[in-house]
């Protein structure tokens, strides 16, 4: 009876059953085969569990290794390398971590200090945008007040390319906007800030009384849709019909030879062409508008007005007819094509990003001839690698 209970399947585990069958002289071949099969099933399950645990350990060591590489911390890297070697992580990944550790160990004290400063600024930038999202005015004010001298928070950008001011406006954080406005106002009133951040050409215009009144032939004017794009939707609706800065007739030259070559036309034809021009401006129909400008003298069509007293240039601004505005401005000589420049390697330039009032400073990384449409630049702010920027956004920085 004792031998039968030990050999029965319900007596214990697979190993106990196998031992019982082996010590029993009455066990049949079938019972021995069955006991061995049950033990092998347990061993297979144990091997699968071992593989799963090794995979989890290797994955954790792999993630820890690359986390240490990203953090660039020597102690963390040494610990991660030892853990990766014990978990049988690929040699290629371990070698990458060892190279990073060697690079850190060979850094000079000055390089370590500069790296620490970059990390601190990166963390401050991240915290600042988090505080703007939470509308934490007290924390944001403390962070900005504790910035080191020469550190400009106005140059910080988030993942969407927004400044702190733009981010606060988009997220409707009123108390954060007040803090940023106060800090920006105080900084703008500083003479050092004006000297550092105002481009030389703009500084010359600002410092010259009446400079903008005579700058029509030199300053490139933008179409109204460019200014509207820089505003929020609410501001764009309020500013959809701005008062024009200039009248079309102000740009007409009395001794224009091109006008003199155009024939005189009757009053009836003039009224007909005037109606066509007004309709073309409203519909932003450039071909139809070009026909009128080709037949009528500039001194005549520049004084055309609709029943509301709006001339063609003003009407194109109000209706957002950017193509018609460009054609009219070009015909009046308000805009001129910017001359392409040759950019030398290591030359300093301004980059005017659409939607940002303050341009970004950058350095040209390679000689760029006039025929190239983009320029390889490295921006002064941030740690991003060099990137190619369209030529039309770049202006040379003159000392």
Image (cartoon, rainbow, N blue to C red):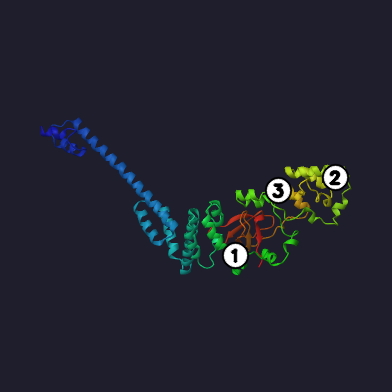
Residue ID for mark 2: 270
Res 156 seen here: no
Give the CA distance from mark 2 to mark 1.
52 Å
Location of the N terminus by quadrant is top left
Asked where in the image residue 49 lies, by quadrant, the reply is top left
Q: Single out the residue that lies furthest toward the front.
A: 308
CB of mark 3 within 8 Å of CB of mark 2?
A: no
Give the CA distance from mark 3 to mark 2.
24 Å
Mark 3 vs mark 1: which is more N-terminal?
Answer: 1
Give the CA distance from mark 3 to mark 1.
32 Å
Q: Element under label 1?
A: helix
Q: Position of residue 82 (x, y in %)?
A: 35, 57
Front one among 364 and 283: 283
Asked where in the image residue 390 lies, by quadrant, the reply is bottom right
Taking the spot 35% from the left edge, 49% from the top edge, the residue there is 57
Q: Position of residue 95 (x, y in %)?
A: 42, 56
Indicate whether 396 appears above or below 307. Answer: below
Front one among 224 and 361: 224
Mark 2 vs mark 1: which is more N-terminal?
Answer: 1
Mark 3 vs mark 2: which is more N-terminal?
Answer: 2
Q: Position of residue 175 (x, y in %)?
A: 51, 57
On screen, residue 7 versus residue 157, left or right, reads left
Residue 188 numbered tag = 1
On screen, residue 253 versus residue 167, left or right, reads right
Indicate whether 285 appears above or below 110. Answer: above
Taking the spot 87% from the left edge, 45% from the top edge, the residue there is 267
Res 168 seen here: yes
Q: Element under label 3?
A: helix
Residue ID for mark 3: 318
Residue 315 numbered tag = none
């Amino acid at each position: 009876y004792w031998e039968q209970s030990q050999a029965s399947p319900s007596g214990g585990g697979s190993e106990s059953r196998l031992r019982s069958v082996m010590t029993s002289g009455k066990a049949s071949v079938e019972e021995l085969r069955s006991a061995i099969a049950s033990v092998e099933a347990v061993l297979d399950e144990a091997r699968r569990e071992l593989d799963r645990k090794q995979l989890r350990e290797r994955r954790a060591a792999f993630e820890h290794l690359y986390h240490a590489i990203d953090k660039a911390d020597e102690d963390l890297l040494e610990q991660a390398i030892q853990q990766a070697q014990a978990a049988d992580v690929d040699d290629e990944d371990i070698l990458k971590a060892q190279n990073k550790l060697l690079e850190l160990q060979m850094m000079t004290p000055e390089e370590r200090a500069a790296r620490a400063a970059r990390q601190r600024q990166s963390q401050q930038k991240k915290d600042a945008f988090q505080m703007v999202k939470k509308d934490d005015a007290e924390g944001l004010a403390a962070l900005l007040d504790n910035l080191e001298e020469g550190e400009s928070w106005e140059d910080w950008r988030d993942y969407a390319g927004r400044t702190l001011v733009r981010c606060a406006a988009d997220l409707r954080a009123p108390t954060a906007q007040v803090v940023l406005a106060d800090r920006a106002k105080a900084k703008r009133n500083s003479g050092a800030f004006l000297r550092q951040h105002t481009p030389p050409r703009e500084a010359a215009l600002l410092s010259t009384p009446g400079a903008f009144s005579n700058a029509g032939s030199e300053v490139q004017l933008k179409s109204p849709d460019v200014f509207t794009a820089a505003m929020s939707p609410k501001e764009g609706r309020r500013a959809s019909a701005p008062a024009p800065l200039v009248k079309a007739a102000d740009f007409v030259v009395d001794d224009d030879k091109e006008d003199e070559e155009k024939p005189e036309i009757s009053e009836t034809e003039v009224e007909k062409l005037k109606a066509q021009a007004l309709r073309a401006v409203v519909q932003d129909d450039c071909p139809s508008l070009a026909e009128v400008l080709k037949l009528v003298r500039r001194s005549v069509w520049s004084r055309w007005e609709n029943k509301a007293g709006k001339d063609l240039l003003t009407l194109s601004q109000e209706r957002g007819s950017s193509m018609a505005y460009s054609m009219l401005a070009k015909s009046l000589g308000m805009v001129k094509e910017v001359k392409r420049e040759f950019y030398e390697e290591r030359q300093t330039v301004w980059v005017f990003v659409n939607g940002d009032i303050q341009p970004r400073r950058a350095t040209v990384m390679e000689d760029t001839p006039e025929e190239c449409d983009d320029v390889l630049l490295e921006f002064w702010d941030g740690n991003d690698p060099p990137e190619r920027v369209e030529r039309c956004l770049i202006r040379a920085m003159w000392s």
